Amino acid sequence: MSEAPAPHSPLSGLPPVRSVFAGLCVPGRHGRAEGPAGVTVTERTGLAIASVLVRRGREAELVDAVQARFGLALPMTLSRSVAGEVAFLWTGPGQWLAIAEPAAADGFVAELATAL
């Protein structure tokens, strides 16, 4: 009995995923020659990032769900809330970025979809 051929993936043949910063982040001091650096840029890899939008009239439910699942208060102004390996950043009315550090990244988006 022969095995069925594997289905063709639309992603096969694409080059490996690489950072948009690959080759651009050169270690060292750049910009201002003296005094403290004004800005520090560091590439972060392995994070899970998802956009969270609240449905009209259901903000209180979302706030409760985030508190219950992740143990943090959802920020309602330009700020962030962090609990362990997870953070929520307010990006506008009814909008947040949910970010998980690499240690919590596996399955994070699916966890959000289930919890929220």
Image (cartoon, rainbow, N blue to C red):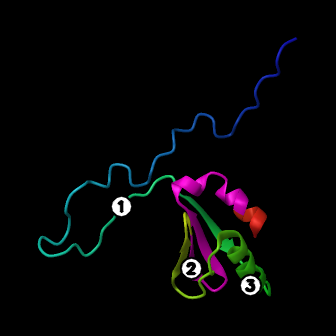
Write down the residue under mark 2: 91
Q: Nearer the viewer, residue 31 or 79?
A: 79
Which amino acid lies under the numbered mark 1 shown in the image of this protein?
Answer: Thr
Residue found farthest to the left: 34
Which amino acid lies under the numbered mark 2 shown in the image of this protein?
Answer: Thr
Q: Nearer the viewer, residue 56 or 13?
A: 56
Q: Position of residue 108 (x, y in %)?
A: 65, 58
Q: Is residue 40 left or right of residue 46?
A: left
Write down the residue under mark 1: 42
Q: Position of residue 112 (x, y in %)?
A: 71, 64
Q: Nearer the viewer, residue 103 or 95?
A: 103
Marks 1 and 3, the one that precedes in the sequence: 1
Find numbered disc 1 in the image and state the secondary structure of the residue it sits on.
Answer: loop
Q: Residues within 10 Å of mark 1 (few under 14, many from 20)?
A: few
Find numbered disc 3 in the image and state the secondary structure of the residue it sits on.
Answer: helix
Marks 2 and 3, the one that precedes in the sequence: 3
Residue 59 badge: 3
Where, quadrant-wise, is the N terminus in this rendering? top right
Which amino acid lies under the numbered mark 3 shown in the image of this protein?
Answer: Glu
Marks 2 and 1, the one that precedes in the sequence: 1
Find numbered disc 2 in the image and state the secondary structure of the residue it sits on.
Answer: strand
Quarter-of-image position of residue 26: bottom left
Of the residues tagged 2 and 3, which is closer to the observer?
A: 3
Q: Position of residue 55 (x, y in %)?
A: 77, 80
CB within 8 Å, label 2 to label 3: no
Q: Residue 93 in magenta? A: yes
